[in-house]
Amino acid sequence: MRAVVFHAVGDIRVDDVPEPEIREPTDAIVRLTASAICGTDLHFVRGSMSGMTPGTILGHEGVGVVERVGDDVRNLVVGDRVVICSTIGCGSCNYCRAGYYAQCQNANPNGPDAGTCFFGGPEATGPIDGLQAERARVPYAHVTCVKLPDEVADDDALLLSDIFPTAWFGARLADVQTGDTVAVLGSGVVGMFAILSAQLQGAGRVLAVDQIASRLEQARRLGAEVVDFSREDPVDTLKRLTGGAGPDRVIDAVGIDAESPGDQRDPGYDSEVQEVAPDQPGDDSPFRRPGDAPSQALRWAVEAVAKAGTIGIIGVYPPAAEHFPIGMAMNRNLTIQMGNCNHRRYVPELVELVRSGAVTPSNVISQIDDLTGAVDAYETFDRRAEGWHKVALDPASVS
């Protein structure tokens, strides 16, 4: 079968790879009918998150049809349409039972203290071959796969694999309450769904911060008040628009991808103290090198949020990222919550929202490409080309 395979930083290819096999009685084999490229995938390709194992199939977003199940998968049958949760949980350990599926004790082959296990990630996360392929082995399929009703189309379900639940989780982390004023840093697809999630969870006002015109226009169409940080100081503006107090809640939906105005180095970043990009693409790589402002969004969040406010962090930060304005956060009595999304906790609820017609997630998909054209799609997406918001891949195009 064909799949998008990581070879080295700056080097990915669409290769012929072996068909996946059932290894454990809780496995299933799913034929992918939709997959996608996520900003997190770009971190691995750029080298801003290190530790990728050559030969790993990329991708952690997928929808498909069950083709085979292990003996202990009792809730799925061949032919079921499913959305695959990006993070993998066993459903049996204490963490999964408490809803912390991203911290499952059993899913990560590196042991119970290893942390989140997800598809297509670095060695520290498994590695588990990903979903940018014709077929995939899904561990703990009875938990990791969620059956789809006929009313939910593949393109809508695809956004339920990671993006929408991650944004929903971000609003939960920020503790959004009825009437709150919420600022969302970053207006990419995660930011879009963070705006929507904050609204659905009761926010009275949402302010969106970005510098890309098309993203700000999307945020405005969702009803957010927009702040272009290339034209005005975002902290000053957020405070002025909230009567000097600052927003009650802030959601960091951008992480290490944050840019300073004009893409300048964050003045609080000390490259001698922190190295966030141990892997670097070669000079001939088509992919961007990691940026120099890894903590810019966090700085703005801490400076802008109201005293005793709450910050929810869902933007990706690599393990090597250590710089953080802890003193300012402490002296302002801030609550800061963060983490990888516990997808299985939220996906069933969001499937029902989509089934009811309350939300149409596929509206954010800007391109659908053949799996064979994935490398070109990665390169264009990496350049942040105008209009490229969310790229879906069609694994069925191979056959």
Image (cartoon, helix red, strand yellow):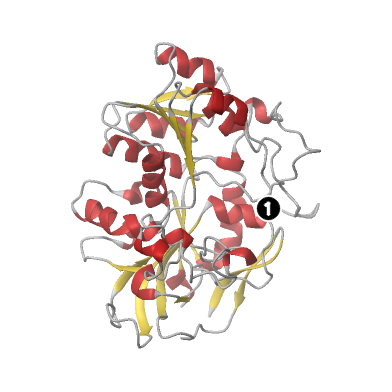
* Residue 252 seen anywhere in this rendered image of the structure: no
Q: Element type at marker 1?
A: helix
Position of residue 362 relative to residue 115, above or below, is: above
Q: How dense is the environment of label 1, judged by Cα within 10 Å: few (below 14), some, or many (20 and up)? A: many
Q: How many marks?
A: 1
* 168 left or right of 240 in image: left
Residue 178 location (% of width, % of height): 26, 30
Position of residue 339 relative to residue 199, above or below, is: below
- Give the residue drawn at x 56%, y 41%: 255
Camera-nearest residue between 388 and 39? 39
- Give the residue drawn at x 42%, y 80%: 27
Which residue lies most toward the bottom here? 71
- Give the residue drawn at x 52%, y 64%: 117
* 284 left or right of 368 in image: right
Position of residue 81 relative to residue 298, above or below, is: below
Residue 306 location (% of width, % of height): 44, 21
Residue 82 location (% of width, % of height): 32, 69
Given the image, on which type of amino acid does mark 1 rest?
Answer: Arg
* Residue 119 seen anywhere in this rendered image of the structure: yes
Camera-nearest residue between 71 and 162? 71
Q: Which residue was labeled with disc 1?
A: 46
Camera-nearest residue between 33 and 385? 33
Residue 290 location (% of width, % of height): 70, 45
